[in-house]
Image (tube, helix red, strand yellow):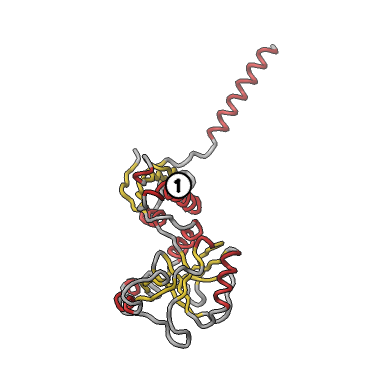
Amino acid sequence: MHRHFIIALAILLFATVGFSCSLLPRRDRLTWRLVLEIDATGADRDAAVERTVTVIERRLDDLGIHNSRVVAQGTSLNGRILVSLPNFADHERLKQIITAGGLLELAAVVSPTNPAPVQTYNTKEEALISLGNKATGNRRVLPYVERAEPTTALRNAEKSWVVVEVPAIVNGGELRTADAVQSAGDPDNYQIHFSLRPEGANRFGAWTGSHINSYLGVVLNGEVKSIAYIKSQILDQGEISGRFTKQSAEDLALVLRSGALPAPVKIVEETAIR
């Protein structure tokens, strides 16, 4: 009798464990695959691949996509990364987030100070002429399209050019937070508010405190997104203005929080997983 009871109890426990396991949520199946290729020099390729994997994993986690695989493919010489993903409603949006450069810089604009208007140029050639027909070690020429997203009219707005100082005052590596915020009085317009880590905040505060009425540019991936003059010392906060939609602002904030990619990447292959 005792032996029969032990056997029956074992069967009951096994059945209970099996039943409990059947209630565990099933992980989403990986359904599509991207192969990325990094544009980096041979000397930096190993580090670039490793850093790119880390940044993409952060972006996917921030989106709530935890069932994914991001791994280097082949040798570091080919600079390729394999990204395996579960189903996602908007493939194009996810590809843009994965490949976005995410390089943020706050840079001094070379211009007469306020109240004079910020110095812009109609063409890149005009801007280069102001530098003696060539960029220098402490100056570079960048495109500037004010409030350039997302309507068709604004996307087609005429581009101008500005000269900014090198190096930037601070960059995205010193970012502490970045969030999409609705603009006051305009429910269809969003901005990205950001704050800086202590070291970047100290440097930014020192520069803004000594450059009242100077112009400052917010540079994203080598393009000036907005320019403002310094009214008073700013310590650790700023914003990227533009006619962002809620989703585009949230996506940009996510990219900035995750950190910049160390080198440009492109998608060289996209396949479904069978």
The residue closer to the viewer here, 67 or 50, is 50
User: Based on the displayed image, in which of its 4 quarters is residue 94 positioned?
Assistant: bottom left
User: Based on the displayed image, in which of its 4 quarters is residue 198 positioned?
Assistant: bottom right
Amino acid type, callout 1: Glu
Location of the N terminus by quadrant is top right
| Residue at the spot of label 1 | 50
User: Does 6 sit above or below residue 69?
Assistant: above
- The local secondary structure at tag 1 comes to helix
- Give the residue drawn at x 49%, y 51%: 58
Location of the C terminus by quadrant is top left
> Which percent across, then down, holds residue 99?
39, 55
> Which percent across, then down, holds residue 268?
31, 49
User: Based on the displayed image, in which of its 4 quarters is residue 223 positioned?
Assistant: bottom left
Q: Is residue 8 left or right of residue 239?
A: right
- Give the residue drawn at x 38%, y 57%: 96
The residue closer to the viewer here, 124 or 229, is 124
- Give the residue drawn at x 56%, y 79%: 210
The residue closer to the viewer here, 123 or 45, is 45
